[in-house]
Image: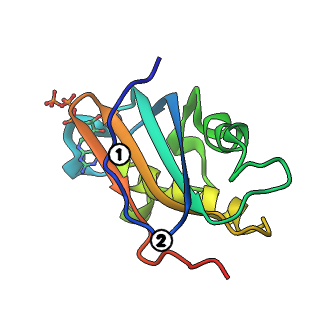
């Protein structure tokens, strides 16, 4: 069972949901300055995503927890992150599979999906813990207001 405290995010919405996932995945950081991380190695990533909004859908959900799991766990679990060429590449440091970039890519995947929903939920925070001592929080700069 995942039990962890996460940083809080301030937002203007009435509802907030959080979904935890753990993801077993391997990666390497393709740059000489990355030291040991240049070598392929694995982590059990702990991911928490925060969705906020003012309206619920026809099921009474802000967004179905399972939809979030399918989008993220379904894509990354038991994979080598570097093999996901749609997301990661070795040519641009912004697209190396670092914890920072993994958090941002998770936000991009989720927000793109949420943008297709008429009740306009927003992903306001993505937390990614790569090791017991290291984590990253990604928050979009601008949280859209619901109309
Ligand atoms: N800013 C970042 N720094 C590092 C990243 C990263 O993604 N962003 N990644 C790594 C490695 O991938 C490594 O797997 C994790 O590093 P680290 O937390 O240093 O791992 P340790 O378990 O050895 O940490 P200790 O606290 O020393 O036990 C490196 N840096
Ligand atoms: Zn690593």
Q: Residue at x 46, y 39 (%)?
A: 47
Q: Is residue 52 left or right of residue 26?
A: right
- Between disc 1 and disc 2, the foreground one is 2
* Residue 29, quarter of picture: top left
Indicate yes or no: mark 2 CB to ligand 1 under 8 Å: no
Q: Which residue is mark 1?
A: 29
Q: Residues within 10 Å of mark 2 (few under 14, many from 20)?
A: few
User: Whole-Å distance between the Cαs marked 1 and 2?
Assistant: 37 Å
Q: Nearer the viewer, residue 88 or 66?
A: 66
Ligand 1's quadrant is top left
Q: Residues within 10 Å of mark 1 (few under 14, many from 20)?
A: many
As drawn, the residue found furthest toward the right would be 58
* Residue 30 seen anywhere in this rendered image of the structure: no
* Residue 14, quarter of picture: bottom right
Q: Residue at x 61, y 63 (%)?
A: 53
Q: Nearer the viewer, residue 107 or 12?
A: 12
The location of residue 37, given as percent across then percent down, is 28, 37
- Which type of secondary structure does the marked residue at label 1 adopt? loop
In the image, residue 118 above or below residue 134: below
In the image, residue 142 above or below residue 65: below
Q: Which residue is mark 2?
A: 12
The location of residue 92, given as percent across then percent down, is 42, 65
Q: Residue at x 24, y 38 (%)?
A: 134
The location of residue 128, given as percent across then percent down, is 39, 43
The location of residue 126, given as percent across then percent down, is 45, 52
In the image, residue 34 above or below residue 20: below
Q: Is residue 49 left or right of residue 122?
A: left
Indicate yes or no: mark 1 CB to ligand 1 under 8 Å: yes
- Which type of secondary structure does the marked residue at label 2 adopt? loop
As drawn, the residue found furthest toward the bottom would be 147
* Residue 80 seen anywhere in this rendered image of the structure: yes
Q: Residue at x 37, y 64 (%)?
A: 10
């Amino acid at each position: 069972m995942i039990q962890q405290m996460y940083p809080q995010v301030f937002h203007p919405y009435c509802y907030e949901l959080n979904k935890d996932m753990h993801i077993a995945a391997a990666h390497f950081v393709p740059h000489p300055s990355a030291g040991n991380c240049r070598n392929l190695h694995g982590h059990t990533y702990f991911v928490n995503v925060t969705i906020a909004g003012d309206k619920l859908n026809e099921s009474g959900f802000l967004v179905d927890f399972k939809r979030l799991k399918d989008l993220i766990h379904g894509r990354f679990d038991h994979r080598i992150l570097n093999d996901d060429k749609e997301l990661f590449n070795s040519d641009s440091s912004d697209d190396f599979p670092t914890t920072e970039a993994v958090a941002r890519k998770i936000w991009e995947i989720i927000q793109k999906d949420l943008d297709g929903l008429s009740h306009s939920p927003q992903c306001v925070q993505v937390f990614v813990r790569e090791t017991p001592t290291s984590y990253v929080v990604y928050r979009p700069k601008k949280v859209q207001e619901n109309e």
